[in-house]
Amino acid sequence: MLNIALPKGRLGVKVYKLFADAGYEFPGMLDSNRRLVFVNEELNMRCFWVKPFDVPVYVERGTADIGAAGKDILLERNPDVYELSDLKAGYCRMAVAAREDFTDDSRRTLRVATEFPNIAQNYYAGLGRDIDIITLRGSLELAPVLGLSDVIVDIVETGTTLRENNLHVLNYIADLSARLIANKSSYKFKNVIINEIMRRLEKNS
Ligand code: PRP
């Protein structure tokens, strides 16, 4: 049986629709219930909802043979998996943002609030800038507004959340979208079926 981990939430719904359009349907997956595991006996496949941040963990350890994960999560966790293809869904960008009145003083340590400490660390290490990372779990926009941080490193999609909190983008760090990932040994031993899934998803995206 082939095991597939999809990220629970908005991105997961988009990705599941790609799978369904490609002929991989798991009845009940989009119903509003709290079930997490769905089997399609005919396909000999099992699909399950996983917290987006945890998809690479399931795939890296082989509990899932393949999965779909945002590029943000792959950059942050740097898992030992194959990134097979860009699913061309959930386009957004990782950005540094600050209050309109913010000016950087390079003599001071920059306070950076983020859900992505490794991405932020790598970005500022590349610039040779000293930073103090403040790791938060969502609603990052509050941090510079209330003075907890100087800047945030966060996902920007439409820019609405920034605008509505009087913040603006200082720099873009990376383009993001959903990626198809595979466990390394699954890719070796279940190569035919995984390549077939990849090919069908690419045809539909
Ligand atoms: C994400 C992100 C921003 C927002 C950006 O948050 O962290 O806050 O979306 O989208 P926009 O540019 O279209 O406004 P999400 O809604 O996932 O919730 P969170 O703040 O709890 O992470």
Image: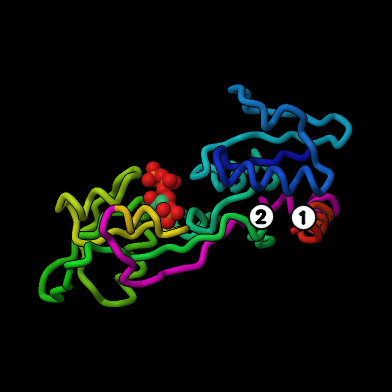
Q: Which residue is under mark 2?
A: 180
Q: Which mark is residue 201?
A: 1
Secondary structure at badge 2 equals strand
Label 1, label 2: how far apart the Cα atoms are: 9 Å
1 vs 2, front mark = 1
Q: Is residue 98 magenta?
A: no
Query: Can residue 81 be seen by looking at this rendering?
Result: no
Quadrant of the drawing holding the N terminus: top right
Report the disc number at residue 42: none
Q: Determine the secondary structure under disc 1.
A: helix
Percent position of residue 133, x then y: 24, 56
CA neighbours of label 2 inside 10 A, class few (<14), some (14 to 19), many (20+): many
Which residue type carries mark 2?
Leu
The kind of residue tagged 1 is Leu
Q: Could you tell which of marks 1 and 2 lies nearer the N-terminus? A: 2
| Depicted 83 relative to depicted 5: above or below | below
Range shown magenta: 165-194
Whether 172 is among the magenta residues is: yes
Residue 21 visible from this viewpoint:
yes
- Number of numbered markers: 2
* Quarter-of-image position of residue 122: bottom left
Picture coordinates of residue 154, whole percent (x, y): 37, 57
| Left or right of 190 on screen, residue 98 | left
Residue 25 found in image quarter: top right
Query: What quarter of the picture does the C terminus occupy?
Result: bottom right
| Crowd around label 1: few <14 · some 14–19 · many ≥20 (10 Å) | many
Q: Are marks 1 and 2 in contact (CB under 8 Å)?
A: yes
